[in-house]
Amino acid sequence: MPLWTRILAGYLLLIVLIGGISGYGYYNLMQLEEQSQQMVQDNMEQMHVANELKETINGQLTHLRGYVLFRDEAMRDDYRSSLSNLRILTRDLQENAVDAQEFQVFETLEHLTNAYVNESTTVTVLLDANQEDRALEHM
């Protein structure tokens, strides 16, 4: 085999080797991109539900404060109508948990939300009964 054929074969082998390494790197990069897109998609739903939960809680606090300060029946009714939405949102977060740690966090959030709902409902009931002093103890 002549020398120029060996040199050419060596260069071709290097080109094939570099092409194989580049192809493998490109394949891994595409796998990483696909996994990151999946993670973003999974977390996007949780972020959406968490933002809805935040907005619901802010709205409830606004309605509760309005009722406490002004005794506006419409604000009390708005507060009560959003209670079920709050519980549904916390359950949605818990159902969309990816792992056990997230599930525990969302379970704790559900317990805290239930405690908040119970206390704020107690406040509205006491205010309805004109027991402002007892209502203030719960706030």
Image: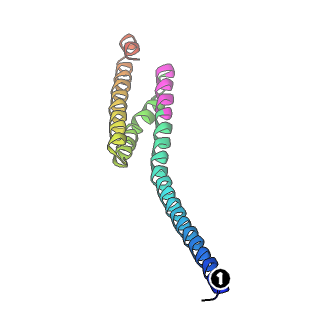
Whether residue 5 sits left or right of residue 41 in the image: it is right
Query: Who's the residue at 45% across and 46% down the image?
Result: 49
Query: Who's the residue at 50% across and 53% down the image?
Result: 40
Q: Residue 40: within the magenta?
A: no
For the record, the magenta segment spans 58-70
Q: Position of residue 102 (x, y in %)?
A: 37, 41
Q: Residue furthest top?
A: 133
Which quarter of the rendering shows the N terminus? bottom right
Task: Check disc 1 and report its element: helix, strand or loop.
Answer: helix
Which quarter of the rendering shows the C terminus? top left
Color encoding of the figure: rainbow
Front residue of 75/28: it is 28
Q: In terms of secondary structure, what is the magenta stretch mainly?
A: helix
Q: Is residue 53 above or below residue 139?
A: below
Whether residue 51 sits left or right of residue 126 in the image: it is right
Query: Who's the residue at 38% across and 12% down the image?
Result: 137
Q: Residue 61: within the magenta?
A: yes
Front residue of 39/27: it is 27
On the image, numbered disc 1 is attached to which residue? 8
